[in-house]
Amino acid sequence: MRRKLAAGNWKMNGTRAAFAEAKALIAAHPAPRCQILLCPPATLIAAMAEIAEGSPLLVGGQDCHADAAGAHTGDISAAMLAEAGAGFVILGHSERRADHAERDEDVRRKADAALAAGLVAIVCVGETEAERDAGSELDVVGRQLAGSVPDGATGADVVIAYEPVWAIGTGRTPTAEQIAAMHRFLRETLVARFGEDGHAFRLLYGGSVKPGNARSIFAIPDVDGALVGGASLKAEDFKPIVAALEDCADRE
Ligand code: PEP
């Protein structure tokens, strides 16, 4: 049984004023039937972890460096995230792959560092619109998955987020068939590589998940939750997404 996960990626949004949103989320879901995670900017992680203490809200980072320490101005190690109170870290988000030229091998090294620090790594994969138009989405995502997920990964410490780049922040989503086909492919690829444990990896869908489409996305086979950007910033938007995932967890 895979625990459902509703993960919010605040990206470079939020100051301490945004803690009101985290508090509202905790108040609305005191005993959720799925995991709820917020990944705020690094500056907010420690304080958000204090707010979340004793509640079911989980806190994560949005990136980490592959090295444990050293001359890497502006970077944060996985152990630093863990010490600040993070239990998760998003890695290989398409914005980092694009803005910081992160390659699969970089993501894999970061994931290794995250696992060594005891964090759960959410490894993001996803094709661009041109790649989907060319019919190469399975090749692209298969390559990213193979290159970004470390050999030592297990379903307990790595989550895969399928995020088509063309669906992120655009209001566009793939069809249910397109999501189902990709998640089936991810599952088969993980089982081929990790054997039976391949069934234990949680597969999140990400890309313009909103209160209005969450329920239908969560009904798709092999969708174990969502990685949510814009709609995770406001509790009023994220709460119904979490509720839809809880209903889905109830039915299993
Ligand atoms: C994301 O950035 O991971 C994301 C899915 O963003 P949005 O939900 O805003 O499309």
Image (cartoon, rainbow, N blue to C red):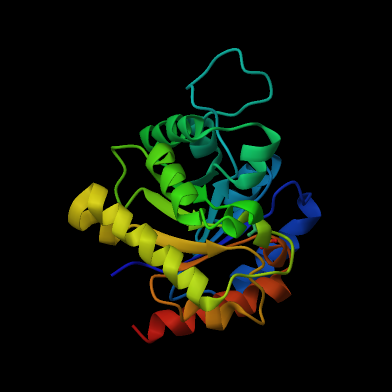
In the figure, is residue 53 to the left or right of 157? right
Give me the residue at 42% from left, 53% from top. Answer: 159
Q: Taking 117 as reference, is 178 above or below it?
A: below
The C terminus: image quadrant: bottom left
Residue at the extreme top of the image, as rendered: 71
Q: List x then y, in percent, for residue 58.
A: 51, 57
Q: List x then y, in percent, for residue 30.
A: 53, 74
Q: Quadrant of residue 115?
A: top left
Confirm whether residue 55 shows in the render: no
Give me the residue at 59% from left, 50% from top. Answer: 50
Ligand 1 placement by image quarter: bottom right
Confirm whether residue 166 shows in the render: yes
Question: As rendered, which of 120 and 24 lies closer to the eye?
Answer: 120
Give me the residue at 49% from left, 76% from top. Answer: 177
Question: As rendered, which of 11 and 102 lies closer to the eye?
Answer: 102
Q: Taking 2 as reference, is 120 above or below it?
A: above
Residue at the extreme front of the image, as rendered: 134
Q: List x then y, in percent, for residue 143.
A: 43, 43
Question: As rendered, which of 155 and 151 lies closer to the eye?
Answer: 151
